[in-house]
Amino acid sequence: MTSPSQLTRVALPLPRIGGAPTPPADMPAAHADGSRALIDRYGRVARDLRVSLTDRCNLRCTYCMPAEGLDWMPTEHTLSDEETIRLIRLGVERLGIRQVRFTGGEPLLRKSLEKIIAATKQLRTDEGVAPTIALTTNGLGLPRRIEALKEAGLDRVNISLDTIDRELYAQLTRRDRIKDVFKAIAAASEAGLHPVKVNAVVMPGVNEDGIVPLARFCLEHGAQLRFIEQMPLGPREKWRRDQLVTADQILDYLREDLELTPAREPRGSAPAELWEVTSHDGTLHGTIGIIASVTHPFCGDCDRTRLTTDGAVRNCLFGNSETSLRDLMRAGATDEELMTAWAGEMWAKLPGHGVNDEGFLQPDRPMSAIGG
Ligand code: SAM
Ligand code: SF4
């Protein structure tokens, strides 16, 4: 006989709060099975999904968050593993995503990272292959997990390091952990995750003098360094357009010690402009990238879509528009309804991020809550 609790579960589907959003009238229709490409009005196609797995962090980089941290999201607001995997599955299997990058906050703080990566690696893209899986991390604790992460399917890693000076690193991140980052770079390299990429944000009067030493360090360790222009996403007093260290200035610093020639490989939708470099003394060779998000925006080639820790899809790091797939999911939305909502958010993507416009407004969410 059916028990009363079973009857309730079967007879009463979850209430639909608000219902699925109506797709924009000019958005192309989906295929018969609900699958579609994540395209926008300007013809860009999103293939690269960035998933923020937590807004929390074990560092406090001054350009990213205040010393006391932020108001972390309550756990019940964040996506469960199953919810996260469901959305990644829809992205990869039915919306044309081919690369998934896990970020945060600090993604290594998510205990189930290996499980989520393994589930993602099982999926097949529209080209019939597993998606490429990448991780952006501060590196703390990476060595003891690197083998399991690789086993689960991790293909590539970006490790953040803004200076090789221990004292300055401790000031910048408010934690004396530089040795752990060095170990992380070595471990990723030993695990064969080539090329290991190192991300460095350049800040005026803070680490400009360290540009060449950091470049030499990365070349010596076979890592591909990528300098990032500081973006207006952290504490508001930390960014001034007129004080930005620009990509051109970073190149000038590098030329003091290195011969630079533009890399031959086409850039495509990758944000970094790549340079082949050789030290003037001829001992060091390698590749260095510059990400000029502010002075040379690459919005016209952008192929990204973002999923925040609390289940909102965003079409731009800098935008103020987002759609909560979590709320739809928790109200019982079907896969087709979720895909339509995701596609609608992407369809509305603006042609550019507007950071250089007079009236630019920083997004309400900090970088760590969007996923960098
Ligand atoms: N915690 C991880 C890490 O630090 O790599 C992942 C998240 S973090 C937000 C991702 C990247 O964004 C890091 O390389 C970090 O240096 C960069 N970042 C953070 N705030 C930034 C800003 N205001 N401008 C440019 N890059 C920034
Ligand atoms: Fe944490 Fe990354 Fe932000 Fe630094 S940049 S505080 S490591 S989330």
Image (cartoon, rainbow, N blue to C red):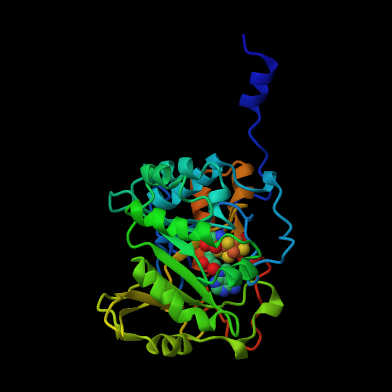
Badge count: 0
Where does the image place residue 140, in percent across and percent down from the top left?
A: 54, 54
In the picture as drawn, the residue positioned furthest to the top comes out as: 1
Horizontal side of 150 relative to 285 (left or right) equals right
Where does the image place residue 122, in percent across and percent down from the top left?
A: 36, 42
Q: Is residue 114 visible?
A: yes
Residue at image position (63%, 43%) is 330
Quarter where residue 117 is shown: top left
Q: Is residue 96 visible?
A: no
322 shown above or below 129: below
- Quarter of the image where the C terminus is located: bottom right
Quadrant in which ligand 1 is drawn: bottom right
Residue at image position (39%, 42%) is 152
328 shown above or below 243: above
10 shown above or below 322: above
Where does the image place residue 74, in percent across and percent down from the top left?
A: 71, 48
